[in-house]
Image (cartoon, rainbow, N blue to C red):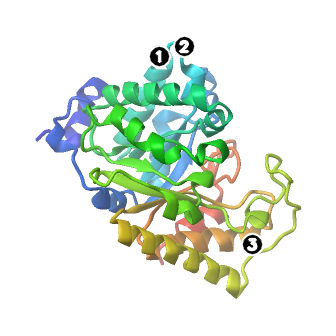
Amino acid sequence: MVSIRKVLAMGALAALLALPAAAREISPEAQVASMKRGVNIIGYDPLWKDPAKARFQLDRHFKTIKAGGFDTVRVNLHAFAHMDAEGRLDPQWLATLDKVVKEALAARLTVILDEHDFNACQDDLAACKPKLTSFWRQIAQRYKAAPDQVVFELLNEPNRAMDPIWNDWIPDLLAAIRPTNPTRNVIVGPTHWNSLHRLSELKLPKADRHLIVTFHYYDPFPFTHQGASWASPVPPVGVSWGAADERARIDKDFDTVVAWAKAEGRPVLLGEFGAYDKGPLDSRIAYTKAVARSAERHGFAWAYWQFDSDFVVYDIKADAWNAPIHDALLPQKP
């Protein structure tokens, strides 16, 4: 078996993707255990259109993330904007993605490739299905020999118009992946923006045992999204959090997820959580810490929203961690 360490030392993505299939098979339970603590990255970075204008520096920020105590990056991909009329992905965009994968693996991080065009899909189902299928067929072919630290996520937060049809799409999308990646772990979540309250409605192919279930957690929304301009209506600022019943609500909600996961035999990733920057800092710290620790107690891997932009855990301009949030996520050892 070729070791990942040896391949990385060779310094070539082509060599990295030439690992034999036996080197990359891992159960979804073991995958979740290895993913541990993660962070969402670069969905809105100029990197994708012009690497010269990138805020995220591939050669050092992945190392920063690993040194900061994280194990996983969830790479938010808005790929539809980089497809031609026939659904082919732009070669330059793919080359950038190759560099992202290479540098993340070199930093010894698990890499989730998350197709994040949920708004485009909700707005136009007829256009979304062929694009999404084409995306996964191309990505699956390109990374078919990648090591097991590369994980696919079918679609971020299916919602609204997608709710009635999402279960029907899941087998079709997996059919675009499985011919080239029969044992790669794939992440899939329920409808209504990956709501835990819709887990009972999620229908997965029972024979496919290389699936990880994800959900997102932003409850209570009036607290986590206070002042967020994209919410409608915009929740007013000044909402605090931290009462005993609010803390207990997290454990109760996560107990529901665990009960479903055990019944279905599926491991779990908490793919997004956080509190928007305009909320009271002491409440944001308390909330972030409470969600992260509860997720860990319940056996979930987690990925915080997000590294840069908003809900920020790293200040790129200051080139430093946003210490209150970072320490809430990853408490320092005594």
Please name the amino acid that badge 1 sits on.
Answer: Arg
Look at the image and tell me in which quarter the N terminus lies. top left
Say whether residue 258 is left or right of residue 197.
left
Q: Residue at x 29, y 28 (%)?
A: 11
Answer whether residue 112 is visible to the viewer in this image: no
Q: Which residue is mark 1?
A: 88
> Can residue 98 be seen in the rendering of this structure?
yes
**Residue 258's spot in the image, x, y percent?**
44, 73
Closest to the observer, 8 or 191: 191
Label located before the other in sequence (1 or 3)? 1
- Amino acid type assigned to the residue bearing label 3 in the image: Asp
Q: Secondary structure at mark 2?
A: loop
Marks 2 and 1 sit apart, C-alpha to C-alpha, by 5 Å
For label 2, the crowd category at 10 Å Cα-Cα, with few meaning under 14, some 14 to 19 and many 20 or more, is few
In the image, is 238 to the left or to the right of 306? right
Furthest-top residue in view?
Answer: 85
Labels 2 & 1 near each other (Cβ < 8 A): yes
The CA span between labels 3 and 2 is 47 Å
Q: Nearer the viewer, residue 244 or 160?
A: 160
Name which quarter of the figure residue 197 lies in: bottom right
In front of the other: label 1 or label 3?
A: 1
Number of on-image labels: 3
Give the residue at x 36% y 31%.
176
What residue is shown with label 2?
Answer: 84
Residue 282 badge: 3
